[in-house]
Image (spheres, rainbow, N blue to C red):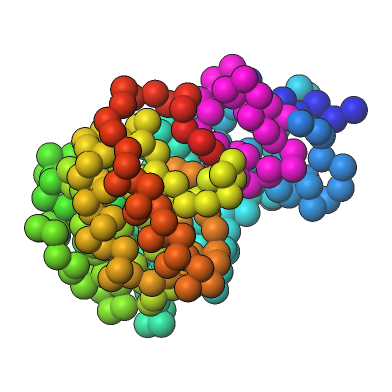
Amino acid sequence: MDGWYVDDRCTNCDVARQLAPDLIGEVEGTSRILRQPGDEAQTRRLHAAVFACPTRSIRHSSRRPDRRLDPFPMELDSGVLLCGHNSRHTAGANSYLLLRPSGTALMIDTPRWSPALAERYTASGPVTDVLLTHRDHAAHGRRYADHFGARLWIHEGDLDAAPDADRVIRGLEPLEVAAGVTAHPLPGHTPGSVLYLADGRYCFSGDSFYWSRTTGDLEVADSVTWYSIEELAASLARTAGRIRFEWVLPGHGDRRRLPADEMSRRLGALTERTRLLRPRPIDFTAVRW
């Protein structure tokens, strides 16, 4: 029997389960191997989880992972790649490359820092901008921006997390940050949370909302809303009617693609549900992945 297991460094960030949900599940607040891979496709999904895991907790009892099966950056759609190699310093947040018609790319939030990884991420085209969704994901922003020769963006509400940012988003109004890409300030999870909307198709939502496999719907992580759930409700009410997208691509939580009309309906319903929420103590174990 193959000897894959999850060690005790797992922080229950959900990254591995997003990539191999048929093989890895949540058991008593941590990830566990549900079954060993039985074919090549399952082996590849498991290796995607291995190379994304921020704590390197998915291990084998007798051999190292096969680096030839590292899929990252991994295509999610023709215009978006998942960076993988999630970082402990961003609590395991997902990061993305947004490909542009000009042949360039934008990085939304950041993976683990490594010069070798940075070179890999430029294979699809020069990265011109690093867009931070909020303070929790700022750890490697400057290093990646400097390596790429790119501009680093953050909202003024979280500027102390990246005081050397090249571009500062101010206020609450949408701001075009690149052709076809708009920043929508969304304070709530943190004072400076932002979502980035691209081409009426992709919504990089940071930690403001995500797709939950548990509920089968868009959700807010109200148990880890650091700043204000009331502000998040107000932000959603202000923004929901302004944006249309097919893909929700969060920092934490799962990704999902639905028709734009269906996403709009669900975002409207989430706005109404969030309006009814009240502050609660921070509790990572209460997140409905």
Q: Position of residue 62 (x, y in %)?
A: 78, 24
Q: Is residue 88 visible?
A: yes
Name the side, left or right, on which 168 lies relative to 33. left
Name the side, left or right, on which 165 lies relative to 233. left
Q: Residue at x 20, y 45 (%)?
A: 231
If the image is split into quadrants, where does the N terminus sit?
top right
Q: Is residue 73 above or below residue 197?
A: above
Q: Position of residue 5 (x, y in %)?
A: 72, 25
Q: Residue at x 46, y 27 (%)?
A: 286
* Quarter of the view holding residue 195: bottom left
Q: Position of residue 110 (x, y in %)?
A: 37, 48
* Quarter of the view holding residue 265: bottom left
Q: Is residue 15 above or below residue 174?
A: above
Q: Which residues are magenta?
A: 8-33
Q: Position of residue 58 (x, y in %)?
A: 65, 30
Q: Residue at x 13, y 46 (%)?
A: 157
Q: Is residue 151 rendered magenta in the image? A: no
Viewer-closest of 225 and 267: 267
Q: Is residue 96 visible?
A: no
Looking at this view, name the residue that lies furthest to the bottom.
102
Viewer-closest of 287 and 35: 287
Viewer-closest of 62 and 89: 89
Q: Residue at x 59, y 41 (%)?
A: 214
